[in-house]
Every structure is written in C-alpha cells, then in structure tokens.
Image: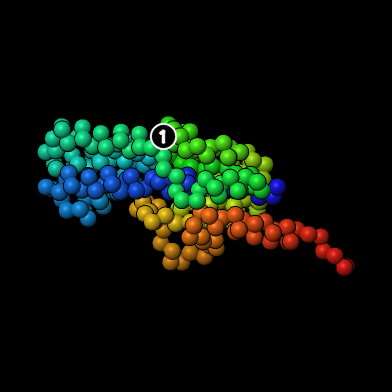
Amino acid sequence: MSTLLVGIDADDTLWHSESHFAVTEKQFTDLVRPWIDDVEAKQLLLDQERMNLHVFGYGVKGFTLSMIETAIAVSEGQISLEAISEIVGWGKKMLQHPVELLPEVEDTLIQLTANYRLVLITKGDLFHQESKIAESGVAGLFERVEILTEKSPEQYAAILNRCHVGPDQFVMVGNSLRSDVLPVVELGGQGVHIPFELTWGHEKVDREGLTSKWHHLDKFGELPALLDQIAQTRSNSNEPLTGL
Ligand SMILES: [Mg+2]
C-alpha cells in the first residue's frame, strides 16, 4: 500500500452532472425566448447564480431559484405561475435523476483501492450529494467522504489534517482546474486534471499567466498508471543516499 492519499472529485469526474444542467438550461432559454435571446439568457442566469452562491451555495436548488429570479427579471414580472412551477419541476427532476457513472470509473476505482487510500471530495448541496453518493454504488471504495461548501486550500488542508498526511503525500483528481487542481497545487500537493466535455461557466479558468503545474489525463482509466508513476518518483526521492 502506497502512502499516497488520493482525493477524487465526484460531479463530472465519477458521474454525469453538468450534462443535466445543460439540458435544463436549454429548457430555460426556450422558456424565456419571448423576452430575451439564448446567449443573453445564459449569461444573465450565470450572473444570477454567481450572485446567489454565497446565499444558496452550490447545487441544483440554488440553480432552480436562480432560474426563477432570472425569468421574473427578464419578463419584467410577466412570467406565468405555470412557467414558474415548470421551473420548479425541472429542479426536482434534476435532484431525482439517477446517478450515471462515467466510463471506466468503477473498474478503475476497484483497481486503485489495492494500492491507495481514496477520499471522495465533493462540494455542493449536502442532501443531494449524499443521495448521489449512496446511489452510486462506489461509496464503499472510499476511506472517507468529504462534502465541502467550497474547495479552497483551507478546506483541503483541513481534510489532510483529518487524514494525517502532509500536502506532499496528497494527489487530487478532478474535472475542474479551479476547484480540484489549483487549490491543491497551491497547498503543495499534486493535481490531476481529467476534463469533462462540459464545464460550468463559474468553473472556467483563464489559463493565461498560470504558472502552476499539474498532470493532465484524457481518461479516468489512465489514473492507476499515473499514480504508480507519482508514487515511484516519491519513493525514489525518499530513498536514503548510498555510497557516501
Ligand atoms: Mg466536478
């Protein structure tokens, strides 16, 4: 067993999430098209979500309330009660959507448990995240599950404390550079970026001027080989010098 602790993100790393938001966002732009074009509707909705993050936190419930607020604002109060209840219905549907694991996830996690301590690290709505984790069928492969309000260097540091490891023994894997990679690299750990085909506007990072270094993988199934390589490099550098 390696001494590396491997943190793994959940939404769009282990299972689909952003694709459900994209489907609902399309329904939303259709709904408000009498008042506003699609590009502007998406931008105003994102602005509203960002404004609401510190009140509602991340997740579907905040997204749903942001859609309602945006619809009321762009229609100048003309949006119907039927339309508002339709939006609420979309939110409920998203919250009750079955969990769909991404390709290679289950087999890869099983493989990783042989050599590494795994921690699932996600952020957002506690109730929804807990339901998805319970339904995913892979929760038992993790040593612990951490549901955060924000993936900041401080919150990652607190997890490392709870797991009794230093940042140099920590590798975090996820689809978001902003949440899964950069804060961990800042802390002195290593980040593995496995991009998903869709990225929420708020998670997008302007890469210009970034000096951080991280690993990039195209597929989740490539993770064991990379972690073995990281563990090997670490153990070589920790070996006592001989021949002195
Ligand atoms: Mg994610």
Q: Is residue 229 above or below residue 159?
A: below
The residue carrying pointer 1 sits among few (fewer than 14), some (14 to 19) or many (20 or more) residues within 10 Å by Cα, namely some
* Residue 240 occupies quadrant: bottom right
Give left or right: position of 190 versus 203.
Answer: right
Question: Is any part of residue 17 visible from this angle?
Answer: yes
Q: Amino acid at mark 1?
A: His
Going by the picture, which residue comes out furthest to the right? 244
Give left or right: position of 215 versus 243.
Answer: left
* Secondary element at image label 1: helix
Q: Nearer the viewer, residue 124 or 112?
A: 112
Q: Nearer the viewer, residue 141 or 158?
A: 141
State how the image is colored: rainbow
Q: Position of residue 16 (x, y in %)?
A: 40, 46
Q: Residue at 88%, 68% (x, y): give it.
A: 244
Q: Which residue is mark 1?
A: 128
Q: Residue at 33%, 38% (x, y): give it.
A: 94
Q: Residue at 11%, 38% (x, y): give it.
A: 78
Give left or right: position of 206 versus 234.
Answer: left
Q: Position of residue 237 (x, y in %)?
A: 73, 61
Q: Position of residue 105 (x, y in %)?
A: 50, 48
Question: Is any part of residue 186 visible from this angle?
Answer: no
* Residue 75 occupies quadrant: top left
Q: Is residue 83 above or below residue 193?
A: above
Query: Does the beta carbon of the residue at mark 1 sit less than 8 Å from ligand 1?
Result: no
